[in-house]
Amino acid sequence: MNTSHPRPFNIVLIGPPGSGKGTQAQLLEERFSLYHLSSGDIIRAIRSKAGTGDTLADEVRSRYDAGIPQPDQVIEELVKREIERLHRKTGFVFDAFPLSLPQAIALERMVQTFDMREPIAISIDVKRDEAVRRLTLRLYCPNDKLVFHPLDADYKGNHCHICGAELQHRSDDTPELAGKRFDTYEERIRVLKNFYKEHGRLLDVAGEQPIKNVFNDILRAIVPYL
């Protein structure tokens, strides 16, 4: 890694559900001492503050518990808080953010505001059939809602490594519903990929490989940007 650059580098991981973004984000975090900024983790963290007088936390929990997606503006505000807190200390690997063009544009504004390096976008490409297969295998914790997969680097068997609860299959992780989620995200991802391609910051990596191979391909792809 080239440490002569005055500012840490930043990575945006793009890919549909089942592409392994979370696993690769963890590996990048460990390799380069980046901060793994996951929109899902941020939402769960602020949700836990509901009832403490934090109005935003109350709003987030209400939508979360009802299964309603958080608006772009809320996601942007939560991400901005984390960047403001940490941007001078570390670079970021963004996982599940941005998930829309407005979020990508908001991140570009944050980059300017906090004088950060422009993020490199890495698209982990997985075909529909493989993504659906992976999604139907994944498990989740009924207590903290964390998602686990047998292919994940931190998978410890059929129990949550946070609370120890027995993992379960989600009722909507059927081939039919998983396929619909893939199609929905694929449209979003196409827009995001075009955005970063137009900015000259898109790298494509084949995701239908063993985890270590995907990671090694990512390392080779980002060398010119370090």
Image (cartoon, grey):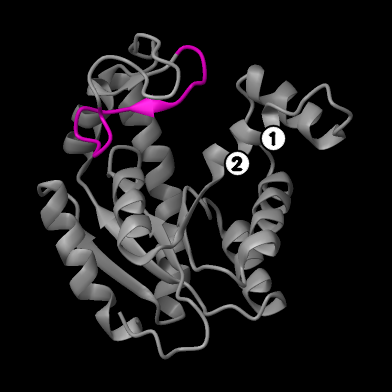
Q: Is residue 178 visible?
A: yes
Tell me the quadrant of the picture where the N terminus can be found: bottom left
Secondary structure of residue under mark 1: helix
Q: Quadrant of the C terminus?
A: bottom left
Residue identified by numbered label 2: 42
Residue displayed at 26% across by 14% down:
158
Residue 169 left/right relative to 192: left
The magenta stretch is 142-155
Q: Name the image quarter holding residue 225.
A: bottom left
Residue at screen point 44% across, 26% down: 146
Tell me if label 1 and label 2 are in contact, CB under 8 Å: yes
Location of residue 105 by image quarter: bottom right
Magenta stretch prevailing secondary structure: loop
Q: Badge 2: how crowded within 10 Å, few (<14), some, or many (20+)? A: some
Inspect this view and state whether residue 15 appears.
Answer: no
11 up-or-down from 136: above or below: below
